[in-house]
Amino acid sequence: MLTTRFPSVRDYFPFEPTDDQATLFVQLDEFLRDQLPGRKVFVLRGYAGTGKTTVVSALVQWLGRMQRRYALMAPTGRAAKVMSAYAGVPASTIHKKIYRQTSGAPSERLSFTRQPNRQEEMLFIVDEASMISDEKAFGENGLLDDLMGFVFEKSTNRLLLIGDTAQLPPVGQLLSPALDPELLAHRFRARVEGVELRQVMRQAEASGILVNATELREELRQEAPNIQLHTKGFKDMFKMGGDKLEDGLRWAYRNFGHENTTIICRSNRNANQYNQLIRRTLFDAEEEIEAGDYIMVVRNNYFWLPKDSEIGFLANGDFLEITKIIRREEVFGCRFAQARVRLVDYPDEPELEVKLLLDTLHTESPSLPRDQNEKMYQEILADYSHLTKKAERNAEMRKDPYLNALQIKFAYALTCHKAQGGQWQAVFVDHGFIKPDEPVGGEFARWLYTAITRASERLFLLNFQRRLLASGEVVEEE
């Protein structure tokens, strides 16, 4: 008797699979075939260059062929944009998918509550899961708990978490909880399966970026990583001294555009310095901020987007381009600009008119320091002292455009945490000051791995110490 073979995700994979990938396809097929209710999670971990994105692209094709329901999500707008590009279908942020806003006091950020999930027999696919925190900084119980609660509100749903454990974990955490099968199984009483891809695909073997990333990934397993980067023999990796940076950036902007070029550094202070250098020397900027400037939102903002916007809110890490400065003003002890902006990561969205808080452009903290924020709040509060009823005063302050001004930084140079989840065609990496006798440990190696893997076509090592380069590599004089 003839039987019909259950189609495999492997049927849609365009290359001959590595051994790791072949194992993955067998386990993934079993996971997808299992229709019994229950909390079922599949964790796909993999190094850079092991084919995670190609696997997801094949999976999306398989899901379409099998008429199965699915949703693609990522922690940030930039990561969702990257995911949409490689999967060929739209992806949204996790926050947009699972939360709805609830109003709080005007001095606080609007709070979010997990919205009900009415979808059944749905596969939720989440990329860049290393960025998902389980700390209670967002929503009711933290992003990971709320994601799990949302997905498994219906027992027929499934969750696929994808990520790279070698990347930086969420800020303030030592590990990435969403990529830890034991933690997921224990805390959420889920049945967790998973595969880790370690074999680099043959197509990636000519890439200096991926070869070096793979070597770094292996060094992370060692107690004392021995970092030896190679550029010789590769067409996608270069090293340079600071004197060559301007020429290098001009070349990258000319060939890839400033949206597809970035500098990654280790501190907000260094990022600020690079941003000012680039604006002054490459773009001849004369004003503190002007049309054409490329900026990043550094604190979630829920005020400026229309209520029916598909995006939901402007998130920490979203990229904007200023198309027009309408006016500048100094009030409430701070400097502001009224401007029109284009949402870089959401090209279908119309331009917005917003108020920008300029003080954050130069702070060495990630956003406006708490004391400055409190001082501004108190000065704005005084403007509403004529409203004696607290509820009325709070309602008016929630609508105040100055209190809701976008906190921003320039986005030509970024810290690695801000860059995580994104990808650029050309990336310049500056490891910053390291004492010559200071040992470089696992934390630095993880930072460097994350920075290097943000590049897709060209990687420039800027002012790298000789000891971080393989023997035979010539260090250019600065």
Image: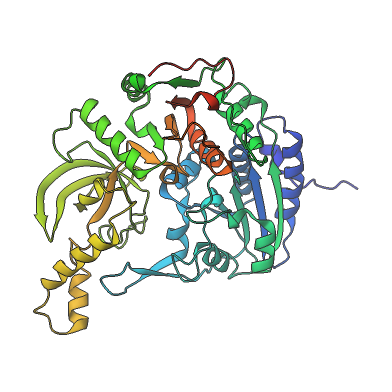
Residue 198 occupies which quadrant of the picture? top right
* Of 458 and 219, the residue lying toward us: 219
Q: Is residue 199 left or right of residue 129?
A: right
Q: In the rendering, at what x and y percent does residue 332 appear?
A: 12, 61
Residue 307 occupies which quadrant of the picture? bottom left
Is residue 40 visible in this depiction of the protein?
A: no
Q: Residue furthest front?
A: 437
Q: Is residue 278 above or below residue 159?
A: above
Q: Is residue 270 left or right of residue 379?
A: right
Identity of the residue drawn at 25% across and 71% down? 106
Is residue 162 visible in this depiction of the protein?
A: yes
Q: In the rendering, at what x and y percent does residue 296 appear?
A: 32, 45
Q: Is residue 135 left or right of residue 177?
A: left
Q: Residue furthest right?
A: 1
Q: Is residue 217 above or below residue 297?
A: above
Identity of the residue drawn at 54% across and 16% down? 473
Q: Is residue 241 above or below residue 325?
A: above
Q: In the rendering, at what x and y percent does residue 420 appear?
A: 46, 44
Q: How many marks?
A: 0
Identity of the residue drawn at 23% across and 32% down? 279
Q: In the rendering, at what x and y percent does residue 280 appear?
A: 21, 30
Where does the C terminus fall, quadrant-wise? top left
